[in-house]
Amino acid sequence: MTVLSVRALAKSYGGVHALRGVSFGVAAGELVALIGPNGAGKTTCFDVLNGQSAADAGAVELDGRSLLGLTPRQIWRLGVGRTFQITATFGSMTVRENVQTALLSRQRRLWSLISLAAHACVDDADALLARVGILEQAHRPCAVLAYGDLKRVELAMALANQPRLLLMDEPTAGMAPGERGELMRLAAGLAREDGTAVLFTEHDMEVVFTHADRVLVLAEGELIAQGRPDVVRADARVREVYLGGGDA
Amino acid sequence: MTAASVLLQFLNGLASASSLFLVAAGLSLIFGVTRIVNFAHGSLFMLGMYAAVALAPYVGFWWSVPLAALAVGALGAVLEALLLRRLYAAPELLQLLATFALVLIIKDFALWAWGPEDLLGPRAPGLEGAVAIAGSRFPEYDVFLIACGPIVLAALWQLLRRTRWGTLVRAATQDRDMANALGVDQRHLFGSVFALGALLAGLGGALQIPREPATLAIDLQVISDAFVVVVVGGLGSIPGAFLAALLIGEIKAFCIGLGFSEFTLAVEFVVMAIVLVLRPWGLLGQMPAPVRGAGAHEPAFALPSRGALQALVAVALALCVVPLLSGGYTLVLLTDILLFALFAVSLHFLMGPGGMLSFGHAAYFGLGAYGAGLLLLKAETSMGLALLAAPLFAVFAAVVFGWFCVRLSGVYLAMLTLAFAQITWSVVYQWDAFTGGSNGLIGIWPAGWLSGKTAYYYVTLATSLAGIAAMWRVLYAPFGYALRAGRDSPLRADAIGIDVRAQQWAGFVFAGLFAGIAGALYAFSKGSISPEALAVPRSVDGLVMVLLGGLHTLTGPVWGAALFTWLQDSVARGFDYWRAVIGAVILLLVIAVPGGLGSILRARSSR
């Protein structure tokens, strides 16, 4: 079942065609990697998908509903969770409070002046923290967490909305090699359990070829190859783009 | 209006745009390189005026201008070396406060050196006459001023484009970290940029003396004008400053020329509002580059322990029995302390958890005070109704001003809050018929049953404690968490569906409401109000209270307000240079104890 469907997406910045007619889909429970050399259009593609910039042409649909023209907030409400290349969490809150805030937002309770936030959604928050494996750190302030653990907090926050689609921008950037595989296994396991579609960009080719079900290769704004990792790895054009460009 | 008078007003606008540009260009240049918004820039302008007036009798006008500019430039170099150099790595709030401390010190210095009277400058020899333009007479000196703006712009442009120093300045403006990594000597660069910026401000001031007298009030007037100019033109952009100075200068000239001088501020405000909505970073400005590694990690705040709550209840109970033990003076002082604690907590709510630094919070305090006075005296309502409805004045202003403020962040936001506060002050100050102008309103006394000091103390105690408790409680509610989320990481807040702007706007209004309540209490406790209640120094008082107590504790602002109010009451009486002392205290705090008194107490208890 296709969760995300992107058709003929185009976007240019002052004459530079960042995306020229990109089409792909991501199915429920599927992990899809979006790769390509620097400047290939990955970031532009992500920005359009999560509502940070507007597309010039094309269609983006989540379960058949168009996402184009919506704000990041509206897109989140429709069921799109995100993690960032550089982790973005709330440093003045504990790990549990970070997740509680996301849960409160989902329930549209953040305008409440009366209830005590610390007592809200504790069980749900702890269940999410247990899923990503940092329940024992629930009471620690995010500001003092190790980077790998922050990535897990982000994942728990992204999952708080029970997303249909999870967008992960460079999920393993800044992590030690050992931690990378662990985080990707975790994300893959959670996605399969919930039937969440996952689209991620990644620089580490080992992570890509180990964990992705399918790989999309962007070069100069065009999709030059897509398919199973072993097929993409053998593709002549992909090899040329990566080896010829000197950026892998 | 005839074509000739339009032309004349246009030329008038150009003439006043020149000195506005000189100030704004210096401000922009300094900000571009050092990322410090120099609140004392208007004070340097003022010093330029006084220095030129003082020098002119000895060396003549034409020598006094460059000498005054050089003197102010040299002072700038000294200030940079002694003070600002220590602050480049400090949080924005401390930088802004330190330059604000300079405003206070420089003002008192000018008061000490030249006295409180306005000083008239000489006319410019050789340019005393007027030229005939379209059948009217236009001062020759103004023609000279019109030329000054473009000449300075061209000179700055050459300096920035053609010299090695200019290349370094541009590199540092675009990417300070990178310039630093490439081995640019920050010390010399920052020092020289600050000196040049100060020189431009001094030059602007000195050139102004044939047109208007040197006064002590000009510093805040100039700085808020300069803020409007750089907000409109784009912070860091010299051509933007020029364009915006022309725009603002012309608007002022035409408002005055058409006989609507009281609308000048309103029109200026509308122009700024339109620009902010269409181009949030100004006409020629760029979105500020994200600061690398800023990671402003605020400490987490947990629910208060049982012991802490018991201690707070004990303090509240102790305050309830004070009137039984002592009277008169103590009660008046405690009433002041309580209402200023409410004001300080509302400011802390805004700038701490809310993450919105305000240099104009007194506007809401003052509007609450004026609201109470106007309702009682003009609408002749009962005292109870006046006290209840007065904060709505503050709420209304917070709704309007906040809507613009939450569109900006960081120093832009701080500049805008100051500009709004200054506009509010000017309206109150100039609207003689309604607000009593500079005299203010008198005869705002509480109703008979509350006229006793004890009775009014209890009203203030109950209202302030309830207000403070309400704000603290809200910080532990989901709304408070949403505010902190927006401050900690706007990106993440947006990505989990939080409407950061809407939450901030509500937070702004919420803080304005409680400042307004404090102001209403103040009006009835004093019996009279003057524009000082909402002037910028009152906003700074609030900042000092918060800073004294420490930004990172909830109770800090209360202790800060208590200490500050007590000091002001005991030390300030009969000492003319009290503001300079406050300035010195701020500088000491910023440099020696950046965490506030709260941090000392915490460090001691954790030892």
Image (spheres, coloured by chain):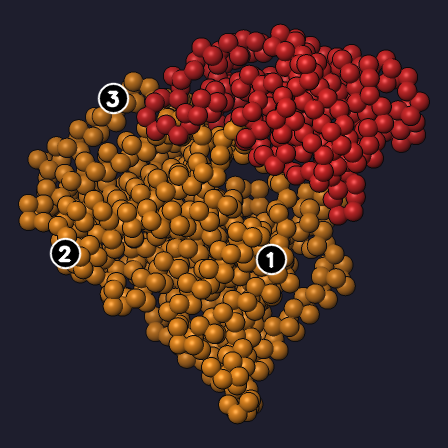
Which residue position is annotated with label 2? B380
Q: Nearer the viewer, residue B148 or B509?
A: B509
- Classify mark 1: residues with Cα within 10 Å, few (<14), some (14-19) or many (20+): many
Q: Nearer the viewer, residue B139 or B179?
A: B139
Secondary element at tag 2: loop
Name the chain letter of the residue that bears numbered label 1: B
Which residue position is annotated with label 3? B310
| Amino acid on which disc 2 is placed | Glu
Q: Mark 2 and mark 1 in contact (Cβ < 8 Å)?
A: no
B531 up-or-down from A57: above or below: below
Tell me, yes or no, whether dots 2 and 3 are on the same chain: yes
What color does chain A have in the rendering? red
Tell me, yes or no, whether dots 1 and 2 are on the same chain: yes
B489 up-or-down from B80: above or below: above
| Amino acid on which disc 1 is placed | Leu
A171 up-or-down from B146: above or below: above
Secondary element at tag 1: loop
B7 up-or-down from B498: above or below: below
Secondary element at tag 3: helix
Name the chain letter of the residue that bears numbered label 3: B
Residue shown at 75% from the left, 37% from the top: A10
What color does chain B have in the rendering? orange
Which residue position is annotated with label 1? B283
Q: Earlier in the sequence, mark 2 or mark 3?
A: 3
